Amino acid sequence: MGACDPAYGSARAAPQGRPKGKGKLDLHRAFFAQIISQDGDITMPELASALFDATGVHAHPDTTGRFLRRLGYSCKKSRGSTPNAAVPR
């Protein structure tokens, strides 16, 4: 009855963490592509909200951003944008 007894399995540690996979957002890849093609200037919170409204799937804006970066999308700020008028300089 020891840890190395073949009747009790292996002494190797079990895998830890979440199982490998694509995640819950991979099913909605086409949805994100459609929304981004309609409005390329949409924010991550707006994308997460649109996903919830359309499918009922909750996703944090940070998770949505990481998923889109893995798909090759990038977020770039334009240099010609004007600063927010509500913030004093």
Image: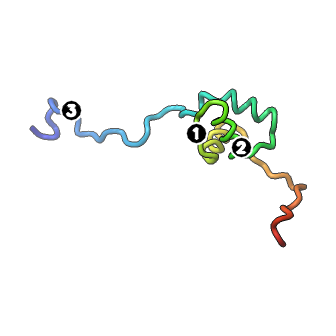
The residue pinned by badge 2 equals 46
Q: Earlier in the sequence, mark 1 or mark 2?
A: 2
The residues tagged by marks 2 and 3 sit, at their Cα atoms, a distance apart of: 49 Å
The disc label shown at residue 58, or none: 1
The residue positioned farthest toward the bottom in the image shown:
89
| 71 sits left or right of 83 in the view | left
Amino acid bearing label 2: Glu
Amino acid type for the residue under numbered disc 1:
His
Tell me the number on the disc at residue 9.
Answer: 3
State the residue at coordinates (80%, 39%): 40
The residue at 62%/44% (across/down) is 66
Q: Position of residue 29 (x, y in %)?
A: 66, 30
Instruction: Say left or right for 15 vs 60.
Output: left
Dividing the picture into quadrants, the one containing residue 70 is top right
Measure how far apart labels 1 and 2 are at the Cα level.
12 Å
**Label 3 amino acid?**
Gly
Residue 6, horizontal then vertical, whole percent: 16, 31
